[in-house]
């Protein structure tokens, strides 16, 4: 059975009128959202490799920070949206990556149904691998629709971080990151 047929069957089971003009295209739209947001048919390593080709020689070793990156994912427990705002930092070792690529790494890594804690960790290690640096920091603030709509019904935010290399081992590097992201 095709995904759209399964979604249509679910709507019928939920007593939704699938002949309603507002609902007719819903199975296709839901399929598209699920495919886009779960990395369906995405070759992650190939995509990461392609992103990592946009590198430029750089002799400096000062911190590079991308602030306010927005990404979103589906909560693995409820399939409801989670909106992330991220700050990413790294210490370059011989080159820097194109500025838009950090944003693209964050969005691509979010295309897996995973806990925010795992997303943050996976993004940190992914950047470490593809930027060829041990020195990476990721700070993620998540606004979870499931928290707002169900259970606690709170607008609270969840904050997670992954600090690697010098960001973990050197207090002054970590402090500089925290200061520069304000």
Image: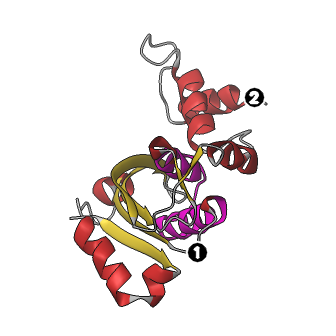
Label annotation for residue 30: none
Which region of the structure is painted magenta? Answer: 102-130
Residue 106 screen position, x and y as percent: 50, 52
Residue 177 or residue 115, whichever sits in front? 177
Quarter of the image with the N terminus is top right
Residue 73 screen position, x and y as percent: 49, 49
Side of 5 relative to 127 (left or right): right
According to the image, label 2 marks what residue? 2
- Secondary element at image label 1: loop
Membership of 63 in magenta stretch: no
Residue depicted at 33% across the width and 68% down the height? 158
According to the image, label 1 marks what residue? 134
Q: Is residue 108 above or below residue 163?
A: above
Residue 127 screen position, x and y as percent: 58, 61
Side of 65 relative to 181 (left or right): right
Residue depicted at 27% across the width and 64% down the height? 181
Residue depicted at 52% across the width and 60% down the height? 77
Please, which residue is most extreme toward the right here? 1
Place residue 134 in its image quadrant: bottom right
Quarter of the image with the C terminus is bottom left
Please, which residue is most extreme toward the front here? 59
């Amino acid at each position: 059975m095709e995904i759209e047929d399964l979604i249509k069957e679910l709507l019928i089971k939920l007593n939704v009128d699938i002949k309603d003009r507002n609902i007719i295209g819903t199975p296709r739209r839901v399929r598209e959202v699920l495919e886009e947001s779960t990395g369906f048919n995405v070759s992650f390593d190939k995509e990461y490799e392609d992103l990592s080709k946009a590198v430029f020689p750089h002799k400096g070793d000062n911190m590079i920070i991308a602030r306010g990156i927005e990404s979103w994912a589906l909560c693995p427990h409820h399939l409801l949206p989670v909106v992330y705002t991220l700050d990413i930092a790294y210490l370059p070792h011989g080159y820097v990556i194109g500025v838009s690529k950090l944003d693209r790494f964050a969005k691509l890594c979010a295309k897996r149904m995973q806990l925010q804690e795992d997303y943050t960790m996976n993004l940190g290690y992914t950047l470490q691998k593809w930027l060829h640096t041990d020195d990476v920091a990721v700070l993620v603030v998540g606004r979870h629709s499931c928290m707002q709509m169900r259970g606690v019904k709170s607008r609270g935010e969840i904050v997670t971080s992954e600090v690697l290399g010098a960001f973990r081992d050197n207090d002054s590097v970590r402090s500089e990151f925290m200061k520069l992201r304000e």
